[in-house]
Amino acid sequence: MVKVGDEVSNKQVIFRDYVIGSPKESDMYLTTGTIKLKVPEGSNAVLVKNLSICPPVFGYGVAKVLDSGHPELKAGDLVWGITGWEEYTLITKTTDTLIKIQHTDVPLSYYTGILGMPGMTAYAGFYEVGTPKKGEYVDLLKNKLGFDEAFNYKEEHDLNAALKRYFPEGIDVYFEHVGGKMLDAVLLNMRHHGRIAVCGMISQYNLDEPEGIKNLLHIGFKWIQMKGFTHRNYYHLYPKFLDLVLPYIREKKMVYVEDLVEGLESGPAALVGLFSGRNFGKQ
């Protein structure tokens, strides 16, 4: 049984080099180092045992505090925030990177998804930036999640035609996390006074040259509000977010799908799969 102060092995996933284009499994390798289970004397660092992590190699995860110099975190606390793809992580920059988990009656892995950064991003983009009103037309998904309409972009040769088919009266609120051809088609189909919340453009991240956008004039013609944000702008609303979402989860009124893999050695394949749509649900 390990205890604070012990020096133990620490399995890690490491990038071989800077990645150009889409990542491949061969860009990463598994290694084992050592780590002392003790925070430096006099620091406010936190040492954690990682329980659940999500891509990339440094990304968001759920962890248990083993040792802490932080005044608000103590050994045994559960936290979510930025950690590493490894068994143990010494976190020296704890401000705005670790949030103590107060509610443990839901799966801890939810704090890497619906109750963590992705969920907070969705909440802020929809309610604080998109500000939908009753009767407006919003870009949605369906399948088993119960939304009104959806389409598979991989099967549509004309995105503009697909959006016109499902939104014949136009779109009031669009949550932008795709970019490129999808954004161009959405701009053609936005209604007057529509809102676009921009938190990412995943289709562009691994391109040597980002795709150009041809329909930006529609922002002016239709008086569209297009606003960029990240979850970090809305950390102060996290308690309000939990008050809204936790009752839906507990009462099973919200459908949340996870795609879980076990073991650090499975991490590289899971990360690569994200870029080809191999996963269904939060990886």
Image (spheres, rainbow, N blue to C red):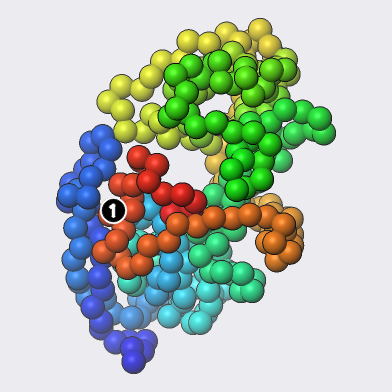
Q: Nearer the viewer, residue 260 or 177?
A: 260
Q: Secondary structure at mark 1?
A: helix
**In the image, residue 162 lies at what x, y percent?**
56, 20
Residue 135 in the figure: left or right of residue 38: right
Residue 38 falls in image quadrant: bottom left
Closer to us: 178 or 78: 178
Could one spot residue 46 in this view of the protein? no
Quadrant of the image for the C terminus?
A: bottom left
Q: Looking at the picture, how far across and down is residue 215, in whole percent?
A: 53, 11
Q: Residue at x 59, y 21 (%)?
A: 163
Vertical position of residue 215 compared to residue 249: above or below: above
What is the x, y in percent for residue 84?
A: 35, 61
Nearer to us in this view, 80 or 214: 214
Res 265 quadrant in image: bottom left
Q: For mark 1, does the 10 Å Cα neighbourhood hold few (<14), some (14 to 19), or many (20 or more) residues?
A: some
Q: In the displayed orientation, state which residue is furthest to the right.
A: 134
**Which residue was labeled with disc 1?**
269
Q: Amino acid at mark 1?
A: Ala
Q: Which residue lies at the image location 31% right of the left edge and 22% below the top edge?
A: 209
Q: How many marks?
A: 1
- Residue 251 lies, with reference to residue 178, above or below; the image says below
Task: Report x, y in % for residue 196.
Answer: 62, 27
- Does the rendering let one see residue 247? yes
Report which quarter residue 274 is drawn in.
top left
Q: Quadrant of the N terminus?
A: bottom left
Identify the residue at horizontal 73%, vertical 64% (top origin): 251
Identified at 57% across, 37% down, the residue is 229
Instruction: Locate residue 242 relative to residue 60 in the image: left or right.
Output: right
